[in-house]
Amino acid sequence: MLRNMKWWMLFAIAFCIVSYNSQNVSAKEPEYKDVMVVYSNTSGKEQIMKLASSIENNFDLLNIVQGDFSAEHLALLKQSHDIQVIEKNTATLETKGTSLKGIIPLANMRMMGVQNAWNQNLTGQGVKVAVFDTGVANIPTLANVKKYSFVEDNPETPEDDRSPLDTDGHGTAVAGIIAGQVGRQLADGNLVGVAPDVDLYSVKVFDPTGAEMETVLKAVEWAIENNIDIINMSFGTEQDDPILYQAIKQAHLAGITMVAAAGNEGNTNAVDYPAKYSEVIAVSSIDNYKRLWKKSNTGSQVEYTAPGVGIFTLSPTENYVQMTGTSMSAPHITGMIALLKQQYPTYTPSELRGVLRNYTIDLGDVGRDPLYGYGLINTAIANPSNVSKFSALQIKKSSATLHYEMAQNAIVPVEKYRIEVTGKKAITTTDTNYVLKDLKQGTTYRAKIITISTLGKESAGKTIQFTTAKDSASEIYVSHNKTKIDNVVKNINKGKKLNLKSEFLPVYTVYNDLTTLQKKAIKKYREKLNLTTISTTSKSTQVKATNLSNMKKKKYTTITFKTAIKPSTLKSSHVYVNYSGKNLSTFTLSKSKNGKTIKIASKKALAAGNYVILIDQKGLKTSNGKAVKNSIAVKFTVK
C-alpha cells in the first residue's frame, strides 16, 4: 500500500529536500499514477500542480487533484502543511448485490404509509434527486429521467461504457423505487415509486467492473454544481477512504442530503462506506414482517431501516423484477426525504434528518439501535416533536413555574402536554405554563415534558433539572435562635450593656432577616456604640476596605485607617469575624509597621452569606497614643 511506502520515502529522501530545484519536476518518469491528493488551500494546490508529472483530473469543488507523481515529489508534498491526504490505488466500489426472489404481494409502499403523503399532494415535485448507480434504462415508466454518465469506455468490451443507459439493471431498479411512474397492476396494487414526481437524475458511475474513485468524484462535483437536493448511493465498500470522505464532506457542506445502503455482508458485519460516514444516512433492510434481513449489515451508524426483501421494481428488459438487498432499502428513504423536501424546501440536511424522526416506528430497542436505527419511516403515524424551549422560572422555596414552547414549524400538531416531575403525580395539560407547588426547599427536581399529538402519539420527551431555593444561612440562624435574639432585644430595651462579640455582633450580622421591632432595637444600640460601619454601599472618611464585592475570590480585605493606629494595641483577640450569626476563627490578622493598614484573610473558602468584621475599639490607640473612640464594622456579602 502507498501509505507504508510514503513513510519510507519520506525518511529516505529527507536529506535532499533543501536542494530541490523546480526545473527537474518532470525529469523523472513518474513512479506513481492516478494519485489522489487533498489540499487545504491555494498554496497546497499550487504545490501539487508544480510537482505533478501530469494531471488527470482537477476537482476544484472538492479540493482534490488526481495525477501522476514521482516518489520524490510525493515525499515533498507529504511534508507540506498545506496538504491533507495523499492516496494511491483508491478502492473500487461495488454495488450491493441483489438476488431474484419469487413473487410476493406488494407491501413495501404500504409499510411506509406513502399514500398518506400522496393524499397531501406530496409526490416529490420540484425536488432534485440524483441516483449514483449503473444508469437507467429507456423505459416508459422512467421516461422523464435525465441521464448522465461519467464512465470512461473500455475498448476491450463490446458495449459503449460511456452510454448513460443501464445494462446491469441495478440503477433502473433503484430509480424505480424512488420515482417510478404508475406502472403495471400487480396482485394488490400498482408498481410506483415513493416520490414519482421528483426531478430524477441518473448519474452513471459504474462500468461492468465497478466504480472508479475519480468517476465518483466527478459525479459528486457535478451534483454540487447542479444544486442536487438528495443523492442515493446504493453501493459501498468495507474500507474507509479519505478521498471519498473529502467528497462526501463537500457535498454535505453544499446542502446535499445523502442516503446509502448499509451493506449486504450479514448482521454481524459493520456498516459499509459511504453509509458509515456521519454525513450520510445509513439504511438497513427489513422484510415484509418488519424483521431484520439476515444479510443486512448493522452498526451504530444505521439511522433508519426500510423494506428490502423481495421488492418489486422496474427492469430494463421486462415490466418488473423482484430484488433483495440494502440497495433496495436506501431508495425508499431517499424517496421519503424527497416528499419532505417538497413540503419544506428550505430545510437543511440536518433539519430533514430531524423531521424524519417524527415519522418513525421504533422496531428494536427503545430509541436508536444498531439493527434498525431509529426505526421504520411511516408518514401516516408520525410522532410529534419535543418542545423547542423548556425552562423552570420563578423558582422559590416551595414552588416553581415550568414554561415550554413548541417550534412554529413543528410538523405534527401537538394537542396537549404530559408533565412528569420527581415525586409528583403526572398531569396532562394544554397550557404552556404550569406552576408546581408543595416542593421541598433546597431540593433538586427533574421535570419532563412529553408532547402528545391529536392521534395520541407521544414524543420522546424533554427533561430539565432545577433546584428550589432554600433559607439562607442568616435565615436559618434567626429561625434557630429566636430566644437568644429576643433576649438581646430585651436587654437593649432595658438599657443593659451587651457583650460585643457574643451578643451584639451575631444579631447585627443577621440584621436584614430580623423583624421590624428587632431591627429598631439593634439600630438603637448601634447608634449608642457610635459604630463606624463600612460596606460596598456605606463609605467612611475614617476607614476604607478593599475587595468587599469580591471576597469569594480574594478571601482577604485590606483595611486602611485615615489616622494610623499603634500596631501593638490591635490584637487578634479584638478582631471578630461573624458569618450569618456564627463567630468564625478561620481569619488571620496581619498589620503594617506604620499602622496605616491591616489585612484580614480567610484560611478557607467563604460560604455564601452575610459577614461582618468587627474591630473592638477597647484598648485601641492611634500612633500618637490617643484612644480610638469608635469600634469599626466592615460588612460584606458572599454570593
Image (spheres, rainbow, N blue to C red):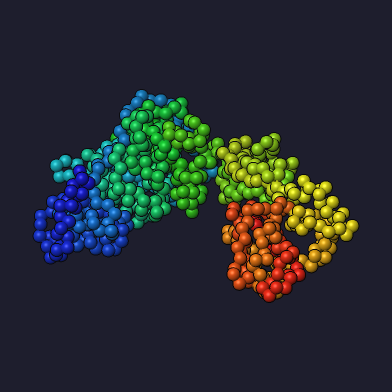
Q: Is residue 169 above or below residue 88?
A: above
Total tally of numbered discs in the picture: 0
Q: Quadrant of the C terminus?
A: bottom right
Foreground residue among 117 and 220: 220
Residue visible at 72% across and 73% down?
626
Q: Is residue 592 above or below residue 396?
A: below
Tell me if I can see residue 431 in this picture.
no
Q: Can you give x and y, in whole percent of width and height, for residue 119 in the image?
A: 53, 41
Residue visible at 15% across and 63% down?
20
Q: Quadrant of the N terminus?
A: top left
Residue visible at 59% across and 54% down?
603
Left or right of 629, for residue 122: left
Q: Can you give x and y, in whole percent of width and height, for residue 630 in the image?
A: 75, 68
Left or right of 55, for residue 511: right
- The answer to which image quadrant residue 104 occupies is top left
Foreground residue among 258 and 106: 258
Foreground residue among 89 and 192: 89
Tell me if I can see residue 246 in this picture.
yes
Q: Can you give x and y, in whole percent of width and height, for residue 622 in the image?
A: 69, 72
Q: Can you give x and y, in whole percent of width and height, for residue 463 in the image?
A: 59, 42
Q: Is residue 83 above or below residue 434?
A: below
Toward the right, the furthest residue is 494
Residue visible at 34% across and 32% down?
269
Foreground residue among 122 and 49: 49
